[in-house]
Amino acid sequence: MDYSVEFSSQFEKSINKLKQRDKKLFEQIQKKLIDIVKNPEHYKPLRNVLAGYRRIHFGPFVLIYKIDNDIIRVISLDHHDRAY
């Protein structure tokens, strides 16, 4: 199945800040986004209030996304303490 990707404005703001501060982490996230498009159900599903969402950890940061039919919606990239 082919997926398209949509980024929230919150994610775009976070990724732009990160691109300026930590190029290495930014590149890791870019590679993982490609992996998400290939196999979005591989990563850990969340529970309770965030049921239906999935997450990936990058050191102290968490990327949260949701799969809606053939669209992957990237919701946020935030520090672990603020992400949940």
Image (tube, rainbow, N blue to C red):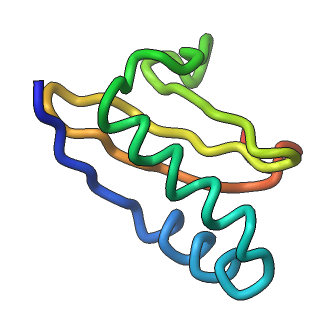
Q: What residue sits 26% from the left and 50% below the top? A: 5
Q: Quadrant of residue 13?
A: bottom right
Determine the residue positioned at 51% across, 58% down.
Answer: 30
Tell whether 3 sits left or right of 81.
Answer: left
Where 68 sits versus 5, above or below?
above
Q: Is residue 2 left or right of residue 62?
A: left
Residue at 52% of width from left, 67% of height from top?
10
Q: Nearer the viewer, residue 57 or 51?
A: 57
The N terminus appears in which quarter of the rendering? top left
- Work out which quarter of the rendered image holds the C terminus and state it: top right
Q: Position of residue 59 (x, y in %)?
A: 85, 45
**17 relative position to 40: left or right:** right
Does residue 22 lie above or below 32 as drawn? below
For the image shown, how many numbered marks are present on the structure?
0
- Percent x, y of residue 4: 18, 46
Residue 67 horizontal/vertical position (percent): 31, 29
Q: Does 13 sit above or below residue 68?
A: below
Name the residue at 73% across, 37% down. Answer: 57
